[in-house]
Amino acid sequence: MPGRPAPVRPQWAGGTLTYGLRLAVLAAALGLWQGLSAAGVIRADEFPSMSQTATALWDQASGSSLWTAVAQTLEGWALGLVTGVAAALLLGTLIGLNGFAYRSVIGLIEFFKAIPVIAILPIGLVLWGATLTMKFALVAFAVFWPLVIQVCYGVRSLDPVARDTTTVLQVRGARRFLTVTLPSAAPFIATGLRVAVAVALIVDIIAELIGGGSGVGERILVAENAGPSAYPVMYAYIVVAGLLGVLLAGAFSVAERYALHWHESQRFARAEAGPGYAGRKEAMSLVVS
């Protein structure tokens, strides 16, 4: 005799538990940081306490210094990301649609993809100096190569059945690209964009930190050079850099969920997160058995 199905748990309960655990882990990490500093395990002249860093962060946020630095960083990030993504989408599509072009240039793309951006930073400084142009050019370079490969793979991953069907139905040109090729490549492009969002921010801050461009990275460098008394400010801006990364990645995840709501991966994720999914799944398995 089959047992009773598991009780249905509301969707909000699972979400609350997940976020509660995350907040608890974060609070424990901050408490450990403060505790090690108070116990003298961490030297204050090398690693300021959590409370000192939080105070410095509040002081910076109270004025215009922090927000100006964040705006400068986001400006370079956005310009470089848009430039690199636009070029990768255009060239990746053209290369992916032509088998000969793909076989001819894929080796060159792999070579440039393997070049660390830090290696071309001196070239950017020679050409443009410590300017906004230098920052977004480096960001665009870093974003372009991995994304163009994803676009090529996505365009070339078209299902043979769909390709043959569109040929039989004489669907050609822009209509074929928009209704068949682009939806097929969309998951590959989304994966490349997810990586590009993070890479763009990392390269942008590196360009500021090492190349002298204005922004969060520059403020970290200035605080480091000011000596131990300014270390709380340095760590405050490091925390800001981490928060920017989390916020940008989260924003893109939400946008991806909405843009690809029709895709199988997003439907499956929503089904698993839906109310009572676990209970319904167990109940179904009991009925089948």
Image (cartoon, rainbow, N blue to C red):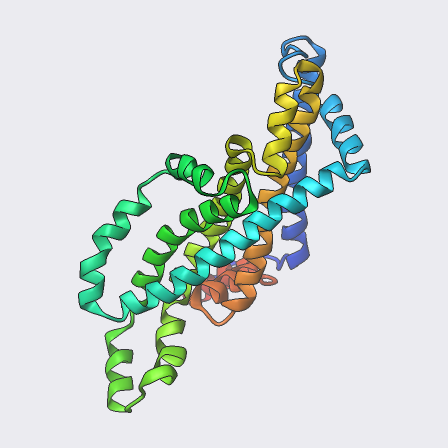
Give the answer, above or below, for where 28 lies relative to 253: above
Residue 237's place in the image compared with 49, above or below, is below
Location of residue 267 in the rendering, given as x and y in whole percent from the top left corner: 49, 67
Residue in the image at 82% along x and 37% along y: 62
Q: In the figure, is residue 115 to the left or right of 40?
A: left
Going by the picture, which residue comes out furthest to the bottom?
A: 169
Side of 54 where 289 appears, left or right: left
Residue 180: percent from left, percent from top: 36, 78
The location of residue 145, given as percent across then percent down, is: 35, 51
Q: Residue 208 appears at what percent x and percent y?
A: 55, 36
Residue at 59% across, 34% down: 217
Can residue 238 be seen?
Answer: no
Left of 97 or right of it: where is 79? Answer: right
Q: Report the residue at 44% width, 56% height from top.
A: 84
Residue 60 in view here: yes
Q: Quadrant of residue 138?
A: top left
- For the residue pair 223 and 21, the one nearer the viewer reads as 223
Q: Quadrant of the C terminus?
A: bottom left
Q: Among all residues in the image, which is located at the extreme right? A: 62
